[in-house]
Image (cartoon, helix red, strand yellow):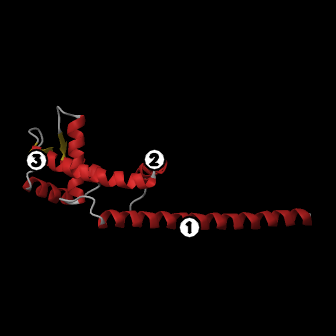
């Protein structure tokens, strides 16, 4: 009986040690992920990937350009859909849309059926501004990818896709 008690207690101790080691590994892994995320974010913001407008302005133009390419017969998005796609608040989106409208990059119009719904569409000037920024961003990405190599670029691309998907499922505080 003493032998069984000894084995049982030993297993509990080993389990506790393994659990603590696993916990510590998760903390280390999470710290590394956070550190990498902060370095990437700082690098992107400090290098000013987008040259002639804010990041959010370029993001909205990219969504509108992508939508008009995919839906040429309905090249508009609602302001609400833009908020959902970007994660921005309505007040933030309204400010960005005002700036883009003042620059002549977009037009806004209300739905004839529901006056609360605002449609947003790219103008030719907005499309040109987007394409200019997009080409610059692709040059930056190409430079980064050439330093990393094809295999690592593919791995990082998939990891970023996975990270974006996983972040959708995180509880917000």
Residue 111's disc number: none
Residue at left 15%, top 46%?
Answer: 128
Check whether the beta carbons of the residues at disc 1 and disc 2 lie within 8 A of each other.
no
Residue 144: name its quadrant: bottom left
Q: Earlier in the sequence, mark 1 or mark 2?
A: 1
Q: In this image, 133 relative to 141: left or right?
A: left
Depth check, mark 1 against mark 3: the one in front is: 3
> In the figure, 114 relative to 105: above or below?
above
Residue 28's disc number: 1
Give the quarter of the figure containing the C terminus: bottom left
Q: How far across and down, in percent of the image, does residue 149 sit?
A: 45, 50
Q: How far across and down, in percent of the image, does residue 172 sit?
A: 39, 60
Residue 150's disc number: 2
Secondary structure beneath label 2: helix
Q: In this image, 148 relative to 130: left or right?
A: right
Residue 47: name its quadrant: bottom left
Depth check, mark 3 against mark 2: the one in front is: 2
Check whether the beta carbons of the residues at disc 1 and disc 3 lie within 8 A of each other.
no
Q: Earlier in the sequence, mark 1 or mark 3?
A: 1
Q: Is residue 168 visible?
A: no
Residue 27: name its quadrant: bottom right
How far, Cα to Cα, is label 3 from label 2? Answer: 35 Å
Q: Nearer the viewer, residue 110 or 161?
A: 161
Report crowding for label 1: few under 14, some 14 to 19, many 20 or more residues within 10 A (C-alpha): few
Residue at left 24%, top 49%?
Answer: 134
How far, Cα to Cα, is label 1 from label 3? Answer: 48 Å
How far, Cα to Cα, is label 1 from label 2? Answer: 28 Å
Report crowding for label 2: few under 14, some 14 to 19, many 20 or more residues within 10 A (C-alpha): few
Depth check, mark 1 against mark 2: the one in front is: 2
Q: How far across and down, in percent of the image, does residue 88 sit?
A: 26, 57
Secondary structure beneath label 1: helix
Q: Is residue 122 visible?
A: yes
């Amino acid at each position: 009986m003493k032998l069984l008690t000894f084995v049982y207690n030993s297993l509990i101790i080993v389990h506790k040690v393994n659990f603590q080691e696993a916990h510590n590994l998760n903390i280390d892994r999470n710290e590394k992920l956070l550190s990498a995320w902060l370095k990437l974010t700082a690098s992107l913001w400090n290098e000013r990937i987008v040259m002639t407008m804010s990041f959010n302005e370029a993001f909205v133009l990219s969504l509108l350009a992508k939508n008009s390419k995919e839906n040429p017969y309905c090249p508009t998005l609602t302001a609400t859909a833009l908020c959902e796609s970007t994660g921005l608040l309505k007040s933030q989106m309204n400010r960005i849309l005002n700036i883009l409208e003042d620059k002549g990059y977009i037009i806004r119009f209300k739905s004839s059926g529901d006056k609360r719904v605002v449609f947003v569409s790219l103008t030719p000037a907005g499309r040109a501004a987007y394409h200019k920024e997009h080409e610059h961003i692709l040059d930056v990405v190409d430079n980064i990818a050439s330093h990393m190599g094809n295999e690592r670029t593919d791995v990082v691309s998939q990891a970023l896709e996975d990270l974006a998907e996983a972040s959708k499922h995180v509880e917000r505080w």
